[in-house]
């Protein structure tokens, strides 16, 4: 079996979305996380794995860059190792109409609803390994989150901090993860 090489996300690719700007000025450009894309393809869906080692980005916990989907797609993530916080936001212009987070542990899943931007945060001391299923032609759009300098909340050593670049940010809600991913993933299509 062919072993796929990961796409690597470096710190400098994240500079527009990092909370701790002072820390970023002196930080070296190191590898933050690893994306193994298209490991499997079944019934119009693509299986990916992302590996996020634990670390701090200054005051902020390590996270993925964050993206919206081009088109109206759902996606499902499952934690394979470690723990994750998934942060979701629904926006129109610079106003957030809905924002919520899901804390998930090994074996638990989070469904990304249609129309929501999202990131994964590794709040733990272990390597976070997560899998996701998405529609094969689902494409990620990073522009809006980069323009806004991140999602509407940052998760830091001091807790959740609102991103002041958004005009309106509702109170952060928390939802429970799915105890396991459904076997039939046709709802993603």
Image (tube, grey):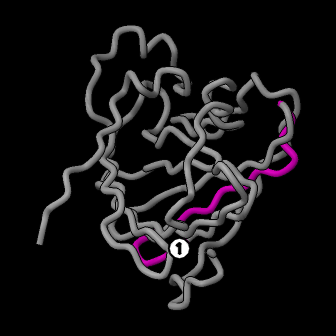
Vertical order, 144 against 85 (above or below): above
Q: Secondary structure at mark 1?
A: strand
Vertical order, 35 against 2 (above or below): above
Q: Is residue 95 magenta?
A: yes
The one of 105 and 16 positioned closer to us in this rendering: 16
The picture quadrant where one finds residue 57 is: top left
In this view, the residue farthest toward the bottom is: 183
Task: Report whether 25 appears left or right of 138.
Answer: left
Residue found at x 43% / y 24%: 58
Q: Position of residue 74 (x, y in %)?
A: 65, 66
Mark 1 Cα within 10 Å, few/some/many (few <14, many 20+)? many
Task: Report whether 164 appears left or right of 128.
Answer: right
Residue with the mark numbered 1? 109
Vertical order, 116 against 181 (above or below): above
Q: Position of residue 12 (x, y in %)?
A: 38, 21
Q: Quadrant of the C terminus?
A: bottom right
Q: Main secondary structure of the magenta part?
A: strand
Q: Position of residue 161 (x, y in %)?
A: 67, 33
Residue found at x 42% / y 80%: 42
Number of on-image labels:
1
Vertical order, 41 against 124 (above or below): below
The picture quadrant where one finds residue 114 is: bottom right
Q: Which residues are magenta?
A: 94-109
Task: Report whether 48 appears left or right of 183.
Answer: left
Q: Is residue 125 magenta?
A: no
Q: Position of residue 121 (x, y in %)?
A: 49, 48
Q: Quadrant of the N terminus?
A: bottom left
Residue found at x 33% / y 61%: 129
The one of 153 and 30 positioned closer to us in this rendering: 30
């Amino acid at each position: 079996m062919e072993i796929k090489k990961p796409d690597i996300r470096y710190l400098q690719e994240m500079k527009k979305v990092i909370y701790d700007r002072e820390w970023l000025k002196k930080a070296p450009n190191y590898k933050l996380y690893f994306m193994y894309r298209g490991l499997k393809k079944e019934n119009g869906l693509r299986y990916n794995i992302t590996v996020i080692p634990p670390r701090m980005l200054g005051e902020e916990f390590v996270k993925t860059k964050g993206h919206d989907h081009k088109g109206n797609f759902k996606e499902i993530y499952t934690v394979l190792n470690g723990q994750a916080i998934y942060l979701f936001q629904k926006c129109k212009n610079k106003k957030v109409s809905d924002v919520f987070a899901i804390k998930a542990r090994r074996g638990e899943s989070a469904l990304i609803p249609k129309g929501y931007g999202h990131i994964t945060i590794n709040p733990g001391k272990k390597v976070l390994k997560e899998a996701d299923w998405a529609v094969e032609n689902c494409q990620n759009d990073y522009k809006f989150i980069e323009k806004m300098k991140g999602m509407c909340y940052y998760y830091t050593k001091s807790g959740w901090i609102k991103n002041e670049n958004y005009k309106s940010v509702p109170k952060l809600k928390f939802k429970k993860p799915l105890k396991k991913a459904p076997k039939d993933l046709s709802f993603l299509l």
